[in-house]
Image: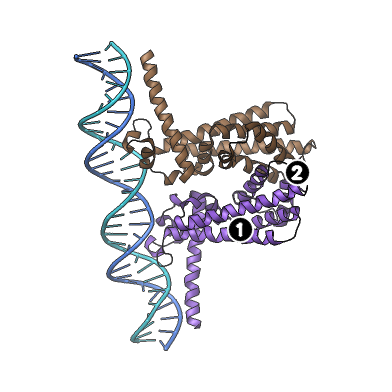
Chain colours: A purple, B brown, C blue, D cyan
Amino acid sequence: MKAYRKQLMRVENRREEIIKEAAILFKERGYSAVTMRDLAKAMGIKAASLYNHIQSKQEILSTIIISLAEEFTNGMNEIVKTRLDTIQKLERIIDLHIDVTLRNADGLAALNNDWMHLEEKNLQYFERMRIDYEENFKKIVRQGVELKEIKPYNIEIMVFSTLSTLRTLYLWYPKKEKIDAEILKKDMISVLLKGII
Amino acid sequence: MKAYRKQLMRVENRREEIIKEAAILFKERGYSAVTMRDLAKAMGIKAASLYNHIQSKQEILSTIIISLAEEFTNGMNEIVKTRLDTIQKLERIIDLHIDVTLRNADGLAALNNDWMHLEEKNLQYFERMRIDYEENFKKIVRQGVELKEIKPYNIEIMVFSTLSTLRTLYLWYPKKEKIDAEILKKDMISVLLKGII
DNA sequence: AAATAAAACTAACAATCGTTAGTTTAGCAA
DNA sequence: TTGCTAAACTAACGATTGTTAGTTTTATTT
């Protein structure tokens, strides 16, 4: 039993290493431009050896994207459940994005740019999650407007503006890792909610 | 002379049609995932026929990206030259992004997602323009902070936040074309500068 | 109507793609 | 040491890639 666990762990680790490296390459060049030979070279092995650990290139992509999408979905569902006021909910959403970005910036590049290369089944699943996420976001903002916690601007514009900044965090954060996560959160909340003038 | 002009015009139009169609496909799937046969099929011709109008796939990409990047560079340089106050300069930047987006949303997808597939020379040229653009943006915001026209938050965060929204406009605008351009501008300026709460 | 040029075509190329089959090496368990 | 298995390897496959060469069709000019 111990032996079994140990072996399984080794396999899983190697698989995770491959997926992690793949995410880095996908971030740099995009899914389609990264070949299995590129990935293998980055891992210091031959392309065929990758297939001892993963089933296909497509499986790597879906593993990266779906797990992240589920993380956002679960996070949003938790926020929706709470009885926080609108501002607090928005702060929690910003928190969620910053947390996920700090933990997996490379994977987020694939989620943002390569989701369309998912195959049928996972593509549908992903698009469903994305639509639901945006709908929840809009609902929170809409309610905020009704309760006069938020200015009565066009809801789509407010949601799009905020969300596009949060979704693009992965592009920007790695460059400025000197900024402490808590400071980032605070300033981000201020800028996104209260504006800059 | 008239004949020469007419012929040249026809060639140029066909070339422009191809580049326009390519931008649409690049937006949907990304540069690397679009084959010359895909593009040819979308144009209703065979792949080899494309080469009567363009020199290479790479040429299509650089034509799309470089011309747009130059448009942003020129627009920003004009704004920097003026004696407007900070708020007005920021409004002009927002204007610039909305104008370019309305005129060429498809091309902006390539600029945002496929610039790394430019070859050496154009890649360097593009990166130079992007860095200068961001530096000019930061300089405007920094001056605004010094003149107390803008809140003293972290400058990188303010610039990044605004710029990432503007850069992602292309993803969002086509869906909501019912929104009038002038209304979009007004609300966008309000949301980005004054915040939503 | 004849001549010319533009723009399509067919066919094929060398390179590269994701992936499979079969084999060898390395590390651990007995 | 022997046996077993994970994880690497070599070699190759059929498909697809961007592109070229050479030819035919279409449209325009004289």
Chain at tag 2: A
Q: Tell if the residue under mark 1 belongs to the same chain as the one under mark 2.
A: yes
Q: Is mark 2 on a helix, strand or loop?
A: loop
Chain at tag 1: A
Provide residue A15's location: percent of width, then percent of height.
48, 66
Of the two numbered discs 1 and 2 in the rendering, the one whose residue sits closer to the viewer: 2
User: Residue at 53% of width from left, 33% of height from top?
Assistant: B104
Q: In this view, does B111 lie above or below A171?
A: above
Q: Earlier in the sequence, mark 1 or mark 2?
A: 1
The residues tagged by marks 1 and 2 sit, at their Cα atoms, a distance apart of: 26 Å
Classify residue B11 by image quadrant. top left
Q: In which quarter of the image is the N terminus of chain B?
A: top left
Q: Is residue B58 above or below residue A183?
A: above
Q: Which disc number belongs to residue A72? A: 1
Q: Residue type at mark 1: give it.
A: Phe
- Marker count (numbered): 2
